[in-house]
Amino acid sequence: INILAIESSCDETSAAVVQNGKVLNNIIATQSVHEKYGGVVPELASRAHQQHIVPVVEQALSAANISKKDLKAVAFTQGPGLLGALLVGSSFAKSLASALQIPLIGVNHMQAHILAHFIEEPKPKFPFLCLTVSGGHTQIVKVNDYLDMEILGETRDDAVGEAFDKIAKIIGLPYPGGPMIDKHAKKGNHEAFQFPETEMPGFNYSFSGIKTAVLYFLQNNSQKDPDFVSDNLDDICASVQHRLIMTLLQKLKKASKHTGIKEIAIAGGVSANSYLRKMLAETGEELNWNTYIPKFEYCTDNAGMIAMTAHFKYQKQEFLGMDAAPIPRMKFSVEKDK
Ligand code: ATP
Ligand code: MG
Ligand code: FE
């Protein structure tokens, strides 16, 4: 059984083929048009998706050595994401599915980030906790089964990836700032500067306060010394990153203690962060966790994870009608305690 999956929720146009539960390829076209704007411009994203989608799908099919008539279903990211971007993927998937007279599968992008863990070994065992950290989301999710997940806590304002990107912009680093902060932090001392943490109830997060704190801190110091940022770039990055990552881990520890679950995974673009990977491994060793970190290419947006999720949905025969529309603020299909 071959399923074609398409991802177009933000600024990556991606296609992948899953064959009997095995992801065969993962073709990704990254949009560089947004770099000079310091963030994703929705209209430009839609246009770039339109340009990339046909070649990306052709590449995925040819890499899998199959043709369109070998497909048993077509899957696409239904949400959450940018409406115009999602529309490109959904329209393409719908026309292909209807032309081939095969089922259509809608995938939740955040669920897919988590199910990226099932593309390769080692796979987490149910139930496990997943810290999903990306450009738009920061969630602690209890994963009971492939398609049964509940959010235990999440950010009340900025996502942690957004905090990385906004703080990088304040520091003067190019977009996307997360990987740049990671790079500079490797050479810096994370104890050089202290940034405050916003206390939040339960398993929730707040990351807008630290952004403002960094802004004022840099403004104050730059007034006294115009070279302050350039002279201390590595230390600033290391200190900011330390604060963000330790905040993430504190709530994750609390959630593990509360639920008694020691199977711990991370997912989403920020799980590419080297300090998070390192600190998660250390914390896991200390607390006897089994930790799971996805391969780099499955951390940020990719159709491989959409294909993996589509495989589980195909097994449950969860198909959509041809009237299905993108859902920019899509929630998990199973969302308890909310
Ligand atoms: P969502 O999945 O919530 O819809 P998104 O798809 O835009 O959002 P991803 O593509 O999963 O998010 O992740 C992108 C984010 O990951 C960006 O904010 C980027 O800065 C961040 N990121 C990527 N690599 C790193 C890194 N090494 N360190 C910190 N942040 C990183
Ligand atoms: Mg992205
Ligand atoms: Fe994403």
Image (cartoon, rainbow, N blue to C red):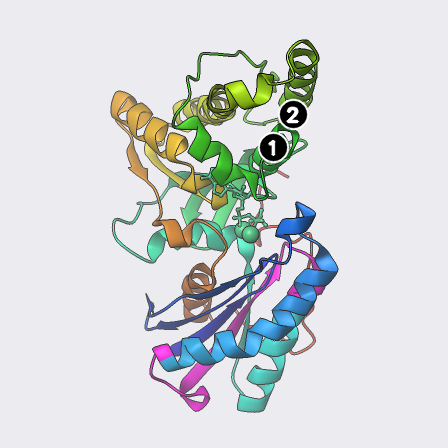
> Left or right: 242 with respect to 32?
left
Residue 76 picture location, percent across and down: 55, 68
Element assignment for label 2: helix
Q: Which mark is residue 163?
A: 1
Q: Is residue 197 depicted above or below 1 in this figure?
A: above
Residue drawn at (56%, 33%), measured in percent from left and top?
Answer: 164
Residue drawn at (35%, 26%), measured in percent from left and top?
Answer: 279
Quadrant placement of the N terminus: bottom left
For badge 2, the amino acid type reads Lys
Residue 270 picture location, percent across and down: 48, 40
Residue drawn at (62%, 68%), measured in percent from left and top?
Answer: 49
**Quarter of the figure with residue 228:** top right
**For marks 2 and 1 on the same chain, the one whose residue lies earlier in the sequence:** 1
The answer to whether any part of residue 326 appears in the image is no
**Quarter of the figure with residue 169:** top right
Residue situated in front as seen by the camera: 293 or 73: 293
Is residue 78 shown in magenta?
yes
- Identify the magenta region: 63-86
> Left or right: 96 with respect to 115?
right
Q: Which mark is residue 211?
A: 2
Residue drawn at (43%, 34%), measured in percent from left and top?
Answer: 183
Residue situated in front as seen by the camera: 313 or 154: 154
Q: How many marks on residues?
A: 2
Q: Residues within 10 Å of mark 1 (few under 14, many from 20)?
A: many
The residues tagged by marks 2 and 1 sit, at their Cα atoms, a distance apart of 7 Å
For badge 1, the amino acid type reads Ala
**Quarter of the figure with residue 189:** top left
Q: Are marks 2 and 1 in contact (CB under 8 Å)?
A: yes
Quadrant placement of the C terminus: top right
Residue 243 picture location, percent across and down: 50, 20
